[in-house]
Amino acid sequence: MVRQRVYGMIAGYEDCNDHDALRNDAVFKMIADRLPDEPALASQPTPSRFENGVTPASLLRAIDLTVRLGVERLARKHGGRVPDVVTVDADPTDDPTHGQQQLTFFHGFYDQHQYFPMIVSEPTTKHIFVAWLRPGKVGAAVGVEDDLERVAAAMRESNPDARLHVRADAGVGGPALYAWCDAGGHAFSCGMGPNKKLNGWAEPLVRAAAERYAKTGVKQRLFAVRPYRARSWKRDYRVVAKAECGAEGSNLRFMVTTAKARTKKQAEAAYDFYVRRGESEQRNEELKNGIAGDRLSCHRFCANFARLLMHAMATNLLSALRDDERVPQELRNAKPETWRTKIVKVAARVVQTTRRVWLETSSSWPHWILLRAVARRACVCARAP
């Protein structure tokens, strides 16, 4: 049933109701290790009972599996060994709800009833290590240290020297996360909200950027760095200020980091490394919209948690398939919707013989070259240990 649901999500059939028809589909039967002439798969009530019967212990085991698979993918990506420093992005995302789901609440900032899941992902593999469903009105940073510790522990099992470099926005970053990183020897780069002291320090930088723009008409981007310690911090960290001025006006941003940033050039490099965390928002967009991870419509919280994890599995499966040089470039970064149009929803005739099952596609299929390349990649995945 997990296979049935996960592959259904990739194909755009995210609801249990869809499987009343898909249960008789020959390809979905083969996905679930059944032959086309064998009995039908589960209909809608059975997956619904399965999801509503999930326990918290089962959810934790599923998360541990997702983390372990992510570590294995990361090791393969880097020549068989987990790197000593692994960058991870911690990014919560709003998940609007429209019913009587347990622990859905109104969130004032998003102006909606919602869940507020935390997503921890890795940028080189685009693997979602943790997708943790949280009640709708919790603080953005709630539980992030526990999620990161789960990932860090799995990394250390593979490489005892492995440490994380955590990237997060200002809502997630804070004294608790900084202290956790210090205790475990991890690094961090987090957004930081402005305050009176930092604004006063960075004001000359903003003026300099505005003056340069007025003279040149070219957008300006200036950086400064200084040690700083807020009252709630246990020690000093480096704060990078970025002042930007262009046709849209001036923009001042701050970032706090443990990275080596003593010069303006190093500060710029550290800030550019931090803002690349914005790519994690694309993974969240794929999870929510491309794989329909926002369809958490069960009443029970644990059932919705299980659904979120299956949506994350579907996202990871697609990411692993397209992360290979043998996959055509136009599909390497293509969204799930593109994969469905060109690869997944392909008309075929299924012919079952005594020894084989043949899938016969049309010779005039316009994306045949893409389909053949992906099929070869899938065969490699199937043979992998």
Image (cartoon, grey):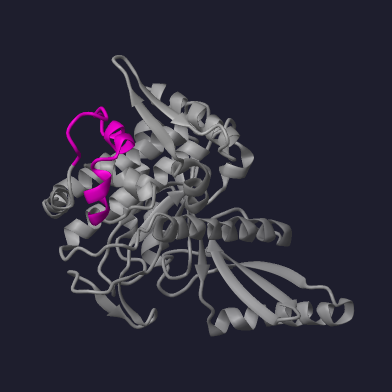
Residue 229 located left or right of residue 68: right
Residue farthest to the right, as pictured: 215
Image spot of residue 335 (x, y percent): 52, 52
Residue 302 located left or right of residue 117: left
- Vertical order, 232 against 153 (above or below): below
Can residue 149 be seen in this snapshot? no
Does the stretch in magenta take in 20? yes
Q: Nearer the viewer, residue 328 or 188?
A: 328
Image spot of residue 252 (x, y percent): 63, 77
Query: Which stretch appears magenta?
Result: 17-41
- Quadrant of the image containing the N terminus: top left
Image spot of residue 16 (x, y percent): 23, 54
Q: Residue at x 68, y 82 (%)?
A: 203
Q: Nearer the viewer, residue 227 or 376?
A: 376
Residue 107 located left or right of residue 384: left
Does the stretch in magenta take in 29? yes
Q: Residue at x 82, y 78 (%)?
A: 213
Can residue 211 be seen in this snapshot? yes
- Quadrant of the image containing the C terminus: top left
Q: Nearer the viewer, residue 305 or 192?
A: 305
Q: Quadrant of residue 245?
A: bottom right
- Vertical order, 157 against 252 (above or below): above
Q: Nearer the viewer, residue 385 or 184?
A: 385
Residue farthest to the top, as pictured: 355
Q: Residue at x 54, y 56 (%)?
A: 279
Q: Residue at x 27, y 53 (%)?
A: 18
- Vertical order, 48 against 170 (above or below): above
Q: Quadrant of residue 200?
A: bottom right
Residue 126 located left or right of residue 23: right
Image spot of residue 206 (x, y percent): 71, 80
